[in-house]
Amino acid sequence: MNLQGDFEGLTLASILQLLCNDQKTGVLTVTSGDEESRVFFEQGTIVYASSSLKESRLGFLIRNDGVISAQQLQRCLSLAREEGVHLGKIMVEKGYISLDTLKKYNTKQVEAILYNLLFWKKGKFEYKDTRLDLKGMIVTQLNPMRLILEASRRIDELSVLKQSIPSDRLVFKMSGKVQSNEEIKLNANEWRILSLIDGTRTVRQIITESGYDEFAVYKIFYSVISSGLIEQEEEIQLSDGEVANGYSAILTVFNDIFQSIKKNIVDELGDRSYSLFEESKSKLSGETKELFKDYHPDVHKNSNLQAINAALKNLDHIENQKEFLISGFAEYCSQVLKRTGEILGVQPLIKILNDIGKVLEYVKKYQTGSKEKNKIVNDMRNVIDAVRSEFNTQGKKRKPRKGIFSFFS
């Protein structure tokens, strides 16, 4: 049996239920925008799932729970690629995790993919009957109906939570109402989220950096808001009436852009991702290089803001410093993207460009109108078009030149 079409709302849950009831064996592929997930059925039971989302990857889940270090994960990823074997097998063979732990996180990964899938509001699906080769795979035995019921419960609860947190662009800060740590009773997950709330990160950035799923983060936010531990900071706006010199809002937008690049390269490059951003500065023009001399996306926003302010004071001969700053960021982004394409190849680069496009769509749709907003959107779209053109020749994608070893050339 082959099924395909568009879905909206709970239609996807009905498709899963149908495949379960009919005891199907095959693969369901679901896409929404640039995201894709695949669900594998064996006689009506879900035995495996895969996703394009980094947050759903096995190594990401294990690392974020502190079971292995980032260095250990990077070592295992390299070996898995070299030997062409499953990442989980390498982690077990190296003694970093037990087989039982691998099975536990394999199930957790599949559940995370499916819960995220059922949160999608619309997209396309295609199911094909096919014989599965499960030899050597660690499979799960998940009942789709249980997952559908749990996902429906989460969707209902999330709609209530979002009444208190209506936008993932909101920024929260510590309220200062709690006088000592003895008064705070939080679990490890809540402490993890609380440690990321600094008055500069948006809710969306915290979801991305924590590695936790959206539902879990919203629940923790609701809990700490209710207890008075945190309070809302003003939402960053790009407006003509912005106070002071207005550089903060510009930095916030480009920080989102740089983070969208970083989250796509850190699994491949690890600590070398830091070097990529530094290396890209050498290609900047004279005054732009001076502007970003002490700037780095990994540094706290307040420190970066001070560095930019100091640099612009030394460049006080420039008449419109906001426009210069935006043009400089666009040039910097261009160099970072080109270097990324040279190292990792076209497919990862396309994913990054699409993610940047999503950031720009949000800025265009929701931020208060201003000439700065329009310049950011226009300049970055020109960068995206130029990079796409450079890394495509008559529709054929270029190959990476030397992979990560190009860092040592």
Image (cartoon, rainbow, N blue to C red):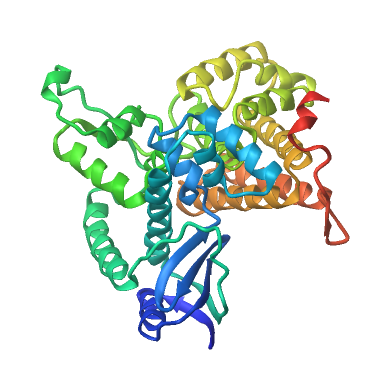
Q: Is residue 333 above or below residue 204?
A: above
Farthest residue toward the right? 394
**In the drawing, does residue 357 fall left or right of residue 37?**
right
- Residue 374: x and y, percent? 59, 46
Farthest residue toward the left? 183
**139 or 384: nearer the viewer:** 139
Q: Quadrant location of the C terminus?
A: top right
In this rendering, the count of numbered labels is 0
Residue at 67% x, 49% y: name it.
84
Residue at 67% x, 15% y: name it.
315
Q: Based on the displayed image, in which of its 4 quarters is residue 206 positioned?
A: top left
Q: Based on the displayed image, in which of its 4 quarters is residue 112 positioned?
A: bottom left
Residue at 52% x, 53% y: name it.
53
Q: Is residue 168 above or below residue 296?
A: below
Q: Is residue 35 above or below residue 340?
A: below
- Residue 55: x and y, percent? 47, 47
Residue at 15% x, 26% y: name it.
184
Q: Is residue 236 visible?
A: no
- Residue 289: x and y, percent? 73, 20
**In the drawing, does residue 111 fall left or right of residue 30?**
left
Q: Is residue 237 visible?
A: yes
**In the drawing, does residue 57 fall left or right of residue 103?**
right
